Amino acid sequence: MCPKCQGFAERVTVRSPHEYYDLVRQIEQVVSDGTLALVAGSCKLAEIRRGTPWPADYIEHTFRCVACEQKFQLAVKTYHGSGGDWSRATSSEYGRSGLKQNQTLTDFQACPCL
Ligand SMILES: [Zn+2]
């Protein structure tokens, strides 16, 4: 962690497509500012857009702080009854596949924009 990325350390829970879209747009901005860099992702961030089908049932992106190499992960399940989160990745969490068991969320699919 460093002063550049400490503002992203807090876990953000994604409970709806609206929150996901908003978060992705914010992250795109941070990446274009050069604060975080995209390390890996299951699709392009630009493919996550309102009014288009989800690129996959499970979407995961990993970012790193360009200053201190701290990893961050955005992982969302887009199908029924799911959600996801933004989190700071520890070395043991990095590369984990799937969400933790207790993160199943119920209102992700209830959004009228889908
Ligand atoms: Zn940093």
Image: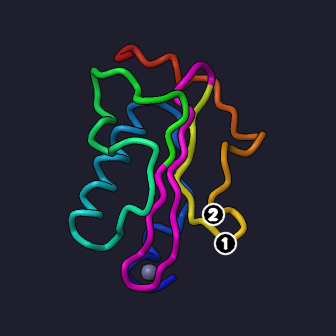
User: On the image, numbered disc 1 is attached to which residue?
Assistant: 91
Instruction: Inspect the image, locate mark 1, and give the three-letter code of the amino acid beneath it.
Output: Ser
User: On the image, numbered disc 2 is attached to which residue?
Assistant: 94
Report x, y in % for residue 108. 53, 25
Q: How is the image coloured?
A: rainbow
Q: CA distance from mark 2 to mark 1?
A: 5 Å
Left or right: residue 114 versus residue 76 is left
The part of the chain drawn in magenta is 61-81
Considering the image in quadrants, where does the C terminus appear? top left
Q: Nearer the viewer, residue 28 or 113?
A: 28
Is residue 69 part of the magenta span, yes or no?
A: yes
Left or right: residue 7 versus residue 100 is left
Q: Tell me the element at label 2.
A: loop
Q: Nearer the viewer, residue 9 or 98?
A: 98
Q: Return the mark for residue 31.
A: none
Image quadrant in which you'd find residue 51: top left
State the residue at coordinates (56%, 59%): 87
How many neighbours does mark 1 have within 10 angstroms: few (below 14), some (14-19), or many (20 or more)?
Answer: few
Report x, y in % for residue 100. 73, 45
- The answer to the question of whether label 2 and label 1 lie on touching residues, with beta carbons closer than 8 A, is yes
Instruction: Inspect the image, locate mark 2, and give the three-letter code of the amino acid beneath it.
Output: Tyr
Q: Tell me the element at label 1.
A: loop
State the residue at coordinates (30%, 53%): 26
Report x, y in % for residue 2. 46, 85
Determine the quadrant in which ligand 1 lies: bottom left
Report x, y in % for residue 54. 41, 26
Tell me: is circle 2 under 8 Å from ligand 1: no
Image height of 72 relative to 23, above or below: below
State the residue at coordinates (35%, 69%): 36
Outermost right residue: 101
State the residue at coordinates (54%, 64%): 10
Is residue 8 part of the magenta span, yes or no?
A: no
